[in-house]
Amino acid sequence: MRALAVLLVVIAVTAVTSCGQEESGTADCAGQIRVDDVVYTSFRVTKQAATEHGTAERAECHDVGADAKGSVFPDDPATVTTWTFADYSPDQVLGVRQDKHSYVVFISSSVPDDERDQILAALE
């Protein structure tokens, strides 16, 4: 009986203290970069050889708070160096160095899913 009374007090206190507070939301963030208004999304890491290409804008992750939006490009985004992979157009695939020996593979949103899967398999 005492446990039930304690539980009721906890519920009542929680209800009173949470009144007026905004609910916080969450959103998933995919790693994204943008080149000339084309958005590329990260999918995997590869150790394939790559050639330095240019720069891209990096999205920020706004994944918590009352207005969680996920991946967003701010007004003044940070930039990253991009890399290309042999046999793939930079219009389709770009890499961003993860460390000295590997790259994160970013694929353009214009690439169909089946073609994206083939590219990812080849860059495994």
Image (cartoon, grey):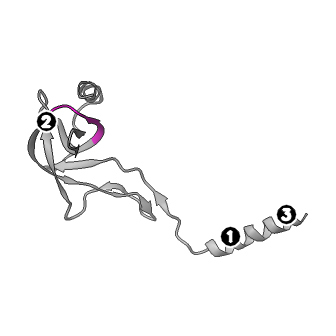
Is 19 magenta? The answer is: no
Which residue extends farthest front?
100
Q: CA distance from mark 3 to mark 1?
A: 16 Å
- Which part of the image, by quadrant, shows the C terminus? top left
Q: Would residue 35 appear left or right of 121 to someone viewing this image?
A: left
Q: Is residue 8 visible?
A: yes
Q: Mark 2 is on which residue type?
A: Ala
Q: Is residue 106 visible?
A: no
Rate crowding at label 1 as few (under 14), some (14 to 19) or many (20 or more) other CA atoms within 10 Å.
Answer: few
Residue 7, placed above or below residue 59: below
Rate crowding at label 2 as few (under 14), some (14 to 19) or many (20 or more) other CA atoms within 10 Å.
Answer: some
Q: Mark 1 is on which residue type?
A: Thr
Q: Mark 2 highlights which residue? A: 50
Q: Mark 1 highlights which residue? A: 14
Which residue extends farthest right?
1
Q: Nearer the viewer, residue 76 or 101?
A: 101
Q: Mark 3 highlights which residue? A: 3
SS for dot 3: helix
Q: Are marks 1 and 2 in contact (CB under 8 Å)?
A: no
